[in-house]
Image (cartoon, rainbow, N blue to C red):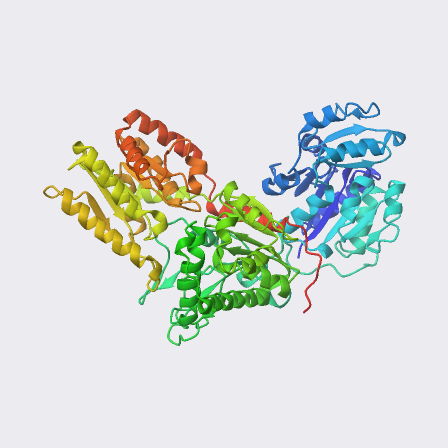
Amino acid sequence: MSMVLVTDLDGTLLGGTRSDRSRLRDALTHHPDVVTVFATGRGAGSVRELLRDPLVPRPRWIIGDVGATVLDGTDFAPVGPVQDALRAGWPGAGPVRAALRRFPGLVYQHGVVQDGRCSYHLAPDRLTDALTSAVEALGCAWVYSADRYFDVLPPTASKGTALRALAGELGWRHREILVAGDSLNDLSLFRLGTHGVVVPDAEPALLTALADTPLVHRPAGAGAAGIHAALRRLGWLPAEPGRPATGRAARPGRAARPGRPAATGPRGRSGSGGRHSLVVAYHRPPLHWDGDDWRQPSSPNGILPTLTSAFTGGLPGVWVTAAVGDTAAVDGTAAVGDTTRADRPHPAGLPLSAVPIDAATWTGYFHRACKETLWPVLMSEPERLVHDERAWADYRAVNARFARHIDALAAPGATVWLHDYNLWLVPGLLRRLRPDLRTGLFHHTPFPSPETFAALPVAAELRRSLASLDWAGFHTAEFAARFRRTLAGLPDRPRTAVHPLGVDRPAVEALVNHRARTPDPDPVRVVLSVERLDYAKAPVQKVDAFERLLARRPELRGRTAFRLVCPPPEPGITAYDLTRRHLEQRVAEVNDRWRQGSWLPVEYLPHRLSATGVIDEYLAADVLWVTSLQDGMNLTAKEFVAARSARSRRSAEPGVLVLSLHTGAATELGGAALLTDPHSAEDLSTVLGRALDLSPADRRARMERLSELLGRERPAQWAARIVRAIRACPEPVASPAR
């Protein structure tokens, strides 16, 4: 458990005699398990100057600009997601000042550096309804303090809101926090229900507002002396020689790392009964038993490697996943029907907890409900939808098992992060089981339009459950907008956010560098596709488009090949059987029609490649051809850019990326890729021809720009940002009945 002091500066931490301040500074220095947070109206520059004073303790975190700024105290870097949320809706200082010029009583504080807010001097008799209405018309909030200071803030910003978000991110509980202040702009801190201390010289209006608040201490000592007394009263500091201890005993044992929750024990557990402050749920385990050994995903990218990287990198909590039929359970407990693999150790380091699911239920849930009912709608092809009530009963059953498992693992007030459409019913179930939890869900798939979503026979059931979320994340703003429109009209709707997932560039670069030599130039130019077998990837349309190009341009025959790496889906999914048969038929027809000697126009590889095998294909390809009819992100495109950028100095002709307009990646990379519309047979052929005709200089310029657009954020950082965003949601009001 952390112990957190959140204190205002002027009049509070900086108040009292030099001796009082020195005593408090020494106490905090010698007890690093008390984390110090500044909550001030000052900006970053002013706090930096203040820290030159040797009597000022170093803060671990800083809430500045009356709650519009949140900084890491070690390097003054903004806590991006928290600060961005606090500043949402801020129109900017210029529009605010322009709109308020008509109020002559407002005197702008020109000598104060302000960030994300506007601060004025204002006499009490000039605080009018007209002024506050003008601020509210701007979509802003305001706070008036000390009968002098009038601050205009973003609509949700305040010291209290910032502290709630920071506490949610770091896992602090209310009983672990002591807030200290002296003016009305500190009132929002005291409204959070934590311990509090009001110093004797506080603004009378603050004292009046807190008159009946039992958790607020009112010590006799001014400023730093009052804070010191409150810390001792809580037992967070030991009694000084000659003074009896008061309050609860100081927490024994090892000090927590400053600014973070104390160590949570095995597998990141915390809270009572070994429960967890963070529960992540995804229906797929990060490894599987292939009959001889545990196997991990071949690609270093995707949701499984992302979550693996996040947990091995220190993300606290537990990962809930499915253990199916006769596959091995991932937490040492045999799944239903499995008595042979429970004693086989799995790779260590991942806090996994399995939901046992028998093979028959899994077939109805995943192979039928997920892939035949939900997937066609997500891909905006509702005409493919097949709904089976028995399969939907299995979907409900699996979601209920996940919800009960999460309920058993989640500590009070915990954060739950769900993944994808496979768990769409869990939010509604958790709202009934555990209203104290903050629940977020990230959609790795596209989200359909409201009209397409409505084609689902179970649309109303799903809408009710999704509305129970606190937070929903997407790869693109368009997917988020469709989600909001789908839930329009429901009384409770979650926050939405856009967090596009990237690739682990260092991991890709390591694989590239492992390939010691650049492949020799191939006389046959290669157009490459690497994708699982799925009608949404448009594999048949690509074969048709490539044949059309060969028919139009005889010079490409014998000199250009389309290499389609297309591994089959897991056994049991019949939804793709027609696509597989049609694809194999078209590949055979095109090759029979156009083959010349040893040259085959279409090289079809219907099996999975290793990670290094995929990298070799990226490095050998002249064009990567991504033609998804719908796609959440498409990390293959990003992997290709990362690989070719890493080898660009040794490659005479960088590869070209041809990218579907309907991928999430197009939103980020469309400025340098060649965009194509796979719904247009003509466009597929024409854009591919353009890609093959690009000059080396144009290829190089495009790849350099693609590399810049790709960025270098690692997937584990992406995961941490999302956990912070979910934790920043307002705290649920209800408590679970347990």
Identify the image quadrant of residue 562. Answer: top left
Pick the residue in front: 565 or 646: 565
Q: From the viewer's perspective, is 713 left or right of 470?
A: left
Residue 353 vertical placement versus 665 (above, below): below
Q: Is residue 73 something that shows in the picture? A: no
Q: Residue at x 36, y 32 (%)?
A: 703
Which residue is rendered at x = 24% and y = 44% of the image? 563
Q: Quadrant of residue 81?
A: top right
The residue sitting at the left extreme is 597
705 sits to left or right of 135: left
Quadrant where the C terminus sits is: bottom right
Q: Where residue 555 sits in the image (x, y, percent)?
A: 17, 32
Above or below, 558 relative to 279: above
Q: Is residue 386 above or below residue 26?
A: below
Between 479 and 256, the one nearer to me in the picture: 479
Residue drawn where x is 62% and y is 66% of the image: 433
Viewer-proximal residue, 526 or 576?
A: 576
State the count of labels.
0
x, y percent for residue 733: 71, 57
Q: Is residue 663 visible?
A: yes
Closer to the camera in the image, 266 or 95: 95
- Residue 381 % position (x, y): 41, 51
Relative to 607, is 446 on the left or the right? right
- Image location (x, y in percent) of residue 273: 62, 68
Quadrant hosting residue 286: bottom left
Residue at (34, 51) in percent of width and height: 535
Quadrant in which the N terminus appears: bottom right
